[in-house]
Amino acid sequence: MMKFNRFFATTLSLSITFCASLNAYDVDILTQYRNNGIQNIAKTLDKKLTQEKYWNHYLQNIDTTFGYIEKYENILICDKSQSILSLYQKENSTYKLKKTYNAFTGKMKGDKHEEGDLKTPVGIYSLTKKISNLDSFYGPMAFVTSYPNLYDKYKDKTGKGIWIHGLPTDKQRDEFTKGCIAINNKSIECLNKDIDINKTVLIINEDGIKQNINKTTLASILTQLYTWRYAWTYNELDKYLNFYDESFERFDGMNKKEFTHYKTRVFSKQERKTIIFTNINVIPYPNEKNTFQVTFHEQYKSDSFTFAGDKILIIKLTNNTMHILTEQ
């Protein structure tokens, strides 16, 4: 009986505290749930995620040194002008510089544009796999990058086989590469121990990487990302399509006009959708003004289609308005 009385007293106390802390917004949400069920609340909360004041508040204590990053524990920064590769690792929610390696990069300066131009690309890349037991010219191992990425293909760049690799084990080499990033063999073995390639992003620039990204800009992008999601979720076709630039071209070559026709057919079904974004990353694109790579894991479910996988958007801010250039 004493245990029951103690439980009852605790429950009563929590209930009184809850009721005392309710504001008008809480009462409205509960009333919507009571009268209309969870779907109506979801729409109300989805609308709240399109408000910039939420994202400004949310970002206050977030480390935005390299952008807004949820997925990556490791950030590799290659500064071609200084011939260095730097490793930053997440520690207590803050990215700390852990190691800096001397690095060889492409013989020719500038961004890579075509096969054989001897340039190291400028951009944002994932590490797709690690390979070993390769030609001794490349040292003990190599990390394969995602070049050409979505934006590279949008800009009609060509070439392939851009790696981070070691140095020849049995001969000297020139102080440049054909486009890869090369560090000494002890360094690449050390790097291999320090990173999980699935939680690592590589950012390459010609002359340093912009740091301490403006939180107001990031809040604006996240607000518009969720406004785009809201329009997508609730079949607001015109608002959804307004986010797509006139130069838009999807990864499969579909242009803005074709994409508009396709989405018009999909939205006309008026299907109920659930769309959830996780592992969101918003990173300024090197050497590109007001351009960002936005990635996230998407869970999509409608009456006729289900999808779960990674999504990539390349966006450009024009007068602080988000325009999607390409997506995959």
Image (spheres, grey):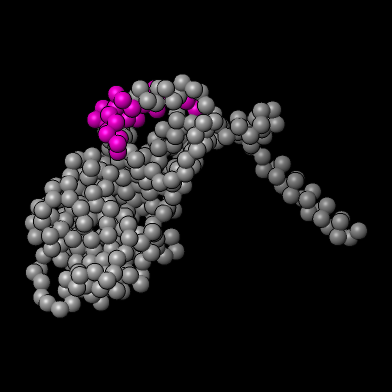
Residue 286, image x, y percentages: 23, 49
Q: Which residues are magenta?
A: 234-259
Count of numbered marks: 0
Question: Is residue 235 within the magenta segment?
Answer: yes
Residue 50 visible in the picture: yes
Left or right, residue 324 beside residue 14: left
Instruction: Classify the position of the C terminus by image quarter.
Output: top left
Residue 81, image x, y percentages: 14, 60
Which residue is found at the position 32% from the left and 48% from the top? Answer: 283
Which residue is found at the position 32% from the left and 60% from the top? Answer: 129
Residue 111 visible in the picture: no
Name which quarter of the figure residue 239 lies in: top left
In the image, farthest residue toward the right: 1
Which residue is found at the position 12% from the left and 55% from the top? Answer: 119
Instruction: Classify the position of the N terminus by image quarter.
Output: bottom right
Q: Main secondary structure of the magenta part?
A: loop
Which residue is found at the position 29% from the left and 74% from the top? Answer: 189
Name which quarter of the figure residue 94 lies in: bottom left
Residue closer to the observer: 281 or 187: 187
Residue 78, image x, y percentages: 22, 60
Residue closer to the observer: 25 or 77: 77
